[in-house]
Image: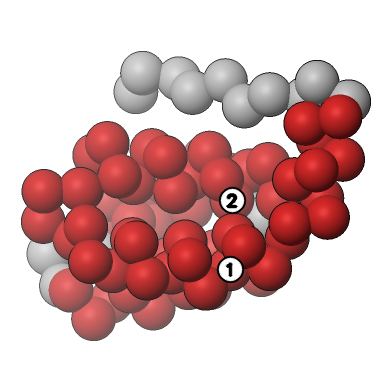
Amino acid sequence: MFEYQKIILKKVSFSKELFKQELTKSHKWLNYIEFNKLIFWATKKFGKIYSDIIFNISNKYVFNYKPNLMNALNNHQFIKIDKT
């Protein structure tokens, strides 16, 4: 699903509103780790264009997962970012 969301975001990147909608929907489809990877990927790929959207969505959804983040950090499950 992570790869699918990347494809969708690439396809809708021409429209700020569509990009925002799809990135917002992504948090429902992806688990915590995948959503974080998507946020990092989107920041790298579209950060110059949509940094405000990515920042707002990541603040809204990523920080709601704090207990999971602490579990991931305690279990040493760190996120590896691919360079695609």
Where's residue 38, x and y in %? 48, 45
- Regarding mark 1 in the picture, which secondary structure is present there? helix
Please give the residue where the numbered disc 1 appears in the rendered image.
61
Q: How is the image coloured?
A: secondary structure
Res 50 quadrant in image: bottom left
What crowding class fits label 1: few (fewer than 14 Cα within 10 Å), some (14-19), or many (20 or more)? some
Please give the residue where the numbered disc 2 appears in the rendered image.
35
- Regarding mark 2 in the picture, which secondary structure is present there? helix
- Residue 19 shows up from this direction: no
In the image, what residue occupies the spot 68% across and 41% down? 33
Choose mark 1 or mark 2, whichever is in front: 1
Quarter in which the C terminus is drawn = top left
**Image marks 1 and 2: residues in contact by CB distance under 8 Å:** yes
In the image, what residue occupies the spot 30% across and 44% down? 43
Q: Nearer the viewer, residue 20 or 56?
A: 56
Q: Nearer the viewer, residue 50 or 16?
A: 50
Is 1 displayed left or right of 76 in the figure?
left
Where's residue 58, x and y in %? 47, 61
